Image (cartoon, coloured by chain):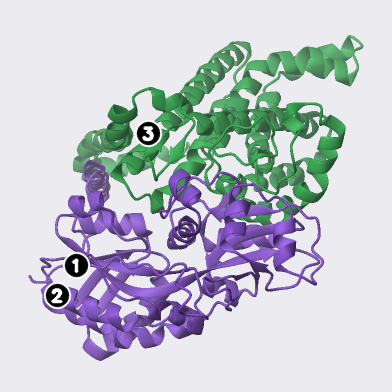
Amino acid sequence: MLGREPAPRRALTLRGRAGVADRLGDPGLRLLTWLASGASMVLIALLVYKVFDQAGESISHFGLGFVTANVWNPVTRRFGAGSFIYGTAVSSLIALLIAGPMAIAIALFLTELAPLRVRRPVATLVELLAAIPSVVLGLWGIIVMAPFLNNTLEPALRSLLGWMPLFAGSASPFGLLPAILILTIMTVPIVAAVTREVFQTVPTELKESALALGSTRWEMVRMVILPYAKSGIVGASILGLGRALGEAIAVTQVIGDETGIHASLFAPADTLASRVASTYQGATSTLEISSLAYLSAILLVFALIANAIARLIVRRSTLRMRAAGPRPGLAVTVAEAQA
Amino acid sequence: MIKNKTAALAGCAALALGLAACGSSNSSSPSTGSVDTLVGAGSTLVAPLVSEWQPEYDKKTKVAVTYGAIGSGGGIAQITARTVDFGASDAPLSEDQFKEAKGVVQIPWALAATVVAYHLEGAPNQLKLTGPVLVEIYKGKITTWNAPQIAALNPGVTLPATKITPIHRSDGSGDTFAFTNYLSHISPEWSSQIGHATEVTFPVGIGAKGNSGVGGAISSTNGAIGYIAIAYVLENKFDYALIKNAAGNYPVPGIPSISAAAKTLTSVPANNEVSIVDPPASAPQAYPISTFTYALVPEKAPKASTLKPFLKWAITEGQTFGPKLDFAPLPEQVVKADEATIEKIGS
């Protein structure tokens, strides 16, 4: 309101001398924005092209059989992605299975239950978790988590749940389980932040009417907030999944880098991203380098699919929410979380 | 003002576009114009020695040597593409790689050893092991530290029943080459089933990246065993195993025992591929797991006049900087063979 009043006067003084700038301003801006957006599109196109181009030798050598082949042998020059796809899928999905409920609980606490005074500090701390560089998290994994898993957690899990093949087998400091836990730690803050924004979009009138009708707080959460925010939560989870799929450094530090599929979560394994990160530098044959590019291409396709699904779901939920009442927060948060 | 800013920003955007467009070409290339620079890339194993050389050689000759420790595979790729003046690899080039690289020669220019380190609570340092026992451990046949095969080698030592966790390098490395080369010498079965290279598929165990990754895994895991570059083991005071040599002794890894192994070398083949793992019994104190690392140089090098003196210096005077980094000096035959090879390089 305050800023609006002097505006006409400024426009008046500008009119005389800034004619050229005015005439160039609009086309200039248009050109600039076009170039910037165009550059990022060209970059993505080139990147995708280059990855598939690099993978060309491997694709023509192994064909689609590469996707299921469970082998990585630089000596005999036979490569395949099977065990890495398995490792990627299992580690990301289980991490999400643990992180999802935790993140929802955190978001509920921060929007509905926590006293106003603690909301901001707790929210900041949770978001700080996302700021820990993954290599530091991986280092913590090696030094602190690995011995704890090997000596305490895995033997305990085995004696409790050893009848399930997932928790059978001998304990190991490095393997799928530590990778899953690291990915969980990385996914929670992202999913929590987006979910919190989604919860904040639930109209107060709905919540209040539920309470006025005599529902408990739990019933209000179950019957109003969660259904309202369902698609938003799914979108947030898939964003988290995208993060887990692509994480390379922290995973490669704790997963044990083994080619093979084991039923046990304790056994060493490897993921697509981790294999590329650990092996690229030392790859000696062009076929191996090309096969690493093939792995990257598969990962790229996975990530694109996850991202597309997330966008679709989030857009559907924003559209619905916009119909219910204006609240632009979600789209912005989603964009931030993706960046 | 507005116009200038807009133009500048537009320029930035155009630049970004341009960068994107040329993103597909190789980025690193030697600086041209000055004859006083040499650019190399490759092996991480030899990197500490090269960085020791750089200031000394610069002081002496005013030639600045730039070295990128991008890994042996990268070194081979870069010299094949001729984007560097020299490459460096921990493994000798295969026939295919020689063919691909079109006229590259290899020059063994440093000698290092790989040590078997372990972490076993309740056991002393310098446990004794043999090649066949290492093969069995890395094939998953021996799984506990108190296995009879290990106990028999260490009379008087009470070994705990701790599970053995074999650890290996997940990235390609000269240490993996040395270690698997040794195991292949000891066991024909290992040689045919797994083979030796800078990166192999280990049947059991956990992979970790780099010496520091393997070191970290060993120190955080009771019962772990792994092979690491000698300098890293001694520097970080890991417990390490004494490995039985062909003469039946258990030499302590170090410059004297590596040099003893190097002395057993009788001849250097035409392609300069030399190996001194598992040296013969004629050298009673020879350490069994050491390896040469190679410089890769094109026969027709545009900077031959700068490159040749550097290589000559590296294999002679440069060797005196090795011992404090636990590199043993090159044996005489290798220096002679190297000198003959360097002579052949022309521009």
* Circle 2 or circle 3, nearest the eye: 3
Assess whether mark 2 and mark 1 are in contact (beta carbons under 8 angstroms): yes
Return the residue nearer the eye: A239 or A24.
A239
Mark 1 vs mark 3: in front: 3
Label 2: element kind: loop
> What chain is colored green?
A
Confirm whether residue A333 shows in the render: no
**What residue is disc 1 on?**
B31
User: Where residue A164 appears, x then y in whole percent?
Assistant: 78, 26
Disc number placed over residue B34 in the picture, else none: 2
CB contact under 8 Å: marks 2 and 3: no
Amino acid beneath label 2? Ser
Q: Quadrant of residue B300?
A: bottom left
Secondary structure at badge 3 equals helix
Which image quadrant is residue B310 in?
Answer: bottom left
**Residue carrying label 3:** A294
Q: CA distance from mark 2 to mark 3?
A: 40 Å
Q: Residues within 10 Å of mark 2 (few under 14, many from 20)?
A: few
The image position of residue A54, as x and y in percent, is 29, 37
Instruction: State the image coordinates of residue A3 (x, y, percent, origin top left).
Output: 49, 40
Q: Chain of mark 3?
A: A
Give the position of the C terminus of chain B as an image quadrant.
bottom left
Amino acid type at mark 1: Ser
